[in-house]
Amino acid sequence: MGDSSLRQRSAAPGERRMFRDPAGREPAVPPEAAEPSPRAQVTTAAGLSLLAGIWLIIAPFVLGYGDGDPYWNDIVFGALVAVISLGQMLAGARYAWLSWLNMLIGAWVFASAFWLDASGRASWNDAILGVIVFLLGAAGAARSTVGGR
């Protein structure tokens, strides 16, 4: 009369069989289940970039930019970030150049914070969002070139 938790049953087709360790430890997680795929990582980075692009579009209205602040810079480049990120979400890790393009736009938004913006509110917003878009683009580019699919 053995322990019922140690009984083995036959696995259904396509099902993985897990065996309980006699010491009672949990079975090890297979390495492929431990880390998300490169496609999932690129899609996540692109999704966050999409949100950053949407924020750039609406920030002049939400934050109430002053008269000297360039509304159109944030709106145009926010729309570009959003469209590129949406394309990257649909394409997955196949097109690393989309991430590089977002990195370039992030660098421009960061630089424009010190060059174009007149108010502190607009400058801080653009500096922070420029860094965020740049880093998310770098994360997507890193996973795109490694993953390939």
Image: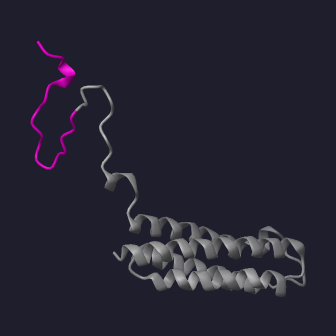
**Which of these two is toward me, 90 or 24?**
24
**Is residue 15 highlighted in magenta?**
yes
Horizontally, is 139 left or right of 53 in the view? left
**Which of these two is toward me, 122 or 38?**
38
Colour scheme shown = one colour
- Using the rendered image of the protein, determine whether residue 75 is visible from the camera's viewpoint: yes
- Name the residue: 78% across, 75% down: 60
Residue 121 found in image quarter: bottom right
Please identify the residue farthest to the top as the structure is shown: 1
- Name the residue: 46% across, 68% down: 43
Quadrant holding the N terminus: top left
- Name the residue: 13% across, 30% down: 8
Quadrant holding the C terminus: bottom left
The answer to whether 14 is drawn above or below residue 128 in the figure is: above
The answer to whether 43 is drawn above or below residue 3 in the figure is: below
Q: Give the range drawn in magenta.
A: 1-19
**Is residue 87 highlighted in magenta?**
no
- Using the rendered image of the protein, determine whether residue 116 is visible from the camera's viewpoint: no
Looking at the picture, how far across and down is residue 136, in whole percent? Answer: 58, 71
Looking at the picture, how far across and down is residue 68, in whole percent? Answer: 90, 85
Residue 145 found in image quarter: bottom left
The answer to whether 112 is drawn above or below residue 41 in the figure is: below
The answer to whether 4 is drawn above or below residue 9 in the figure is: above
Horizontally, is 127 left or right of 21 in the view? right
Looking at the picture, how far across and down is residue 97, in whole percent? Answer: 48, 86
Provide the major secondary structure of the magenta segment: loop
Looking at the picture, how far across and down is residue 33, in whole percent? Answer: 34, 52
Residue 29 found in image quarter: top left
Image mark count:
0
- Name the residue: 77% across, 85% down: 112
Please identify the residue farthest to the front as the structure is shown: 23
